[in-house]
Image (cartoon, rainbow, N blue to C red):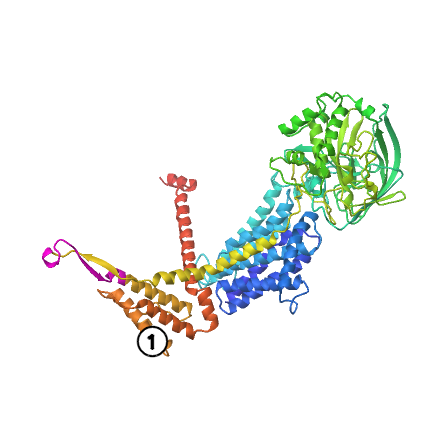
Amino acid sequence: MIAHRNLGLVAAAATLLAAAPLSAIFERWTWLIQAVIAVAAVAAAAALARLGRTPLWAQVLAMLGGLTLALTWLFPSGEELLAVLPTPGTFGHFAELLTGSVEAMRSYGVKVPDVDPLLFVTVLGIGAVAVLVDVLCVGLRRPALAGLPMLAIYSVPVAVYVDSVPPVPFAIGAAGFLWLLVADNVDRVRRFGRRFTGDGRDVDVWEASPLAAAGRRLAVLGLALAVLVPLAVPGMTVGLMGTLNSGVGSGLGGPGLGASPGRVDLFAALSGELNQSRVTDLVKVTTTEQDPFYLRFGVADDLRADGFRVRGPNGQRATGNLPEPAERSRPGIERTRHQATVEVTRELNMPLLPFYAEPASFSDLGNSWFYDPNLQVLFANRDNSRSKKFSFEYIRSTYTPQALRSAQPLPADLPLRRQQTVTPDVPEVRALVAELTEGERTEYDKVRAIYDYFSEDNGFTYQLSTEEGTSGQEILDFLENKAGYCQQYAAALAWMVRDAGIPARVAFGFTNGNRRSGDTLTLTNRNLHAWTEVYFDQIGWVPFDATPSYGVPGSTRSAWAPDIDAPEESTPQTDPTDTPDDADPSAAPERGPDQFEAGDESGAVGGGDTPARQTPRWPLLTVVGVLVLLLLLAMPALRRYALRRRRGRPAPVLRTVDVPDGDSAEPGRPLVLVGADSDRARADAHAAWAELIDTLVDYRVRVDPTETPRATADRLVRETLTADAEAGTAARLLGRAEERARYARDPLTGEPLPAALHSVRGALAGQADRRTRLIAAALPPSVLRRWRTTLADGSERLVTGVGRLRHRMLRFSPRRLIAQRVSR
């Protein structure tokens, strides 16, 4: 028991070490403290159960009970008894936390704050893994299989960080798994007695075993290779090595949006739960412009089959004056200079800073920030936007439709056109673009034809939730459903404009919102937005916002991209500027603090696919789960009942005997004798005796397999059935029948063996306590023991078969073949 107790503690510690990668998910260490409490409760419950020498299933129930008590104390609903005893209200609270965890996963990006739904799911998962690891290591003595539930924990940060996972937490988790394997093997070796070296010398207690030392060296070497090799191989990761090798002025780093260049998914930053009730202030901007355009911070211009992606920026330090934006001297273009000051709150944490397009100079930024004039983004490698305050000058350009219409098509061999007009091969989209732009002669007219297509007259609407399509392409699903939010409108417009042969990209930032005090705008997470930018020759990138304006608080429209859904004069319409901040958000999601995350590259139309809100299915799943659990728990009882019915049905068998004609009453006709066939009688006796042995096991009566049937029956009568003469006679009858069936030429026939079994079973049940009777009925030990033996035999056969297969495969080993050839 001491060895099992130590191994159980090692299993609990290894589980906590395996949970180390989760440190990359949470901002604080609250999850670890709660996980330690839950795992300690599981380990304590398992140790107490083993002290009572309970079977494995009882140990599992004890561990689940300990986990339930820990969760009840950590996440109370207020209806508990003595603070740790759960009530129906407690489990209802747990169900609410599970439901809330789904919404929280959609609402927060890494690193997530300490919210109860996510903490509950995390602690519940770690506790469940602790139960599985304990069962596999201590109960079944299969520690290698414990790596599977540990790997399930590690898969969580892997799913979040697509590019790379921090290597240190992985090393900690791997060390825990190796510790578990070493502890199990040490326990197995100690059972053989004294340790010894390779030359036969005994090893003292204080002296390290050479075999163990070699194992430790191999474990450390294997762990080092597992961590360092992926970092050194190009293309396997861009995490640590990418950070070390990144030069100044390229790539993205720091917290928030992620630290891997070129892999930031701004669509994922805007996706999530749309109906969040919390509003978080993110940016305050003061500008001298009366009606500014959108504040921007990112661009996605790399279109692939799975959607738009963000390329790593590359630029110069954003200190002092920047190269003056190109002059646009053609008629119809107006340029005005303005000043602005941006103050970012602590809630916005990303390696990008928001500003207005066409900046002329920055101040108060420092040397860690860089500006990419091509993407027009302000980025840092080793800094973040939290609590930053800076000022800048910028140029605001406005255009008339005539000025844009006069722009000539870009040359076909221009790198900008070749790069920014690449689209995946979707024939349906290409055909729609060709139909919309048919007859249009200028670049601007083609863009306007596509832009005007996203109108309410064509069935397009702004919705906070979208339906799933069946086309396999998200852009086709959007164009078919004609309902979505800003990410989908911006990405679809950019895709279709590119199909028309005109460069286009998707920009990200903030609308002007509805909270204005003098020259200061307060922008919240409800004002996050995405729009499209189209490039015109000798003019530059011009913004187009195809999202319906009624769904975008603080929306700004222009003369070259008007509101195509504007109502007629006679139609009353609420002014969008009167919409409160807690109305429909412009950005599809509402994020909490640190809302932007890296690495998620989903969606051909924008990466964030928000499903429609549906009725919770957890009650139905709970009922199904309970029914399945009850069915599994009833399997031993059903199996025992089937065995009892099969063994309790002996019946006489008709035998047909051929006799000589002279001895038969009717010559030529066989004689039929009615009686029990000897083979059937012997089988019935064996079945009755097997049933008696199973009954003794179920009612915890000692069974000695070395005794003869008669000796077992006599001992049963002498020790257990002394007060019931009828049951004692029945037990001796069963013993005599089994003895005759084993050793005699003719078995015992004509005796009421089923009645004798019934008599003995009734006497044993009457003498047993209530707990023994309940276990014998619900979870009969005879069935569980038989299943356990079958499982062990099957596992042994599997291991033996694998060993034989390995031995056969080694016959064709190149090293062995070479050695044989050399020996010849």
Q: Secondary structure at mark 1?
A: helix
Q: Quadrant of residue 382?
A: top right
| Magenta region | 661-681
- Residue occupying the far left of the picture: 662
Is 671 colored magenta in this rendering? yes
Task: State whether residue 262 is above or below residue 666.
Answer: above
Q: Between 574 and 134, which is closer to the camera in this rendering?
A: 574
Q: Between 518 and 315, which is closer to the camera in this rendering?
A: 518
Where residue 263 sits in the image (x, y, percent)? 68, 39
Disc 1: which residue: 726
Residue at coordinates 11% horizontally, 56% vertically from top-left?
660
Q: Is residue 454 visible?
A: no
Where residue 644 sits in the image (x, y, percent)? 38, 63
Q: Amino acid at mark 1?
A: Glu
Residue at coordinates 76% horizontally, 24% vertically from top-left?
445
Where residue 154 sits in the image (x, y, percent)? 60, 50
Looking at the image, residue 646 sits to the left or right of residue 138; the answer is left
Residue at coordinates 66% horizontally, 67% vertically from top-left?
83
Where residue 266 sits in the image (x, y, percent)? 71, 40
Q: Quadrant of residue 329?
A: top right
Is 732 colored magenta in this rendering? no
Q: Classify the position of the C terminus by image quarter.
A: top left
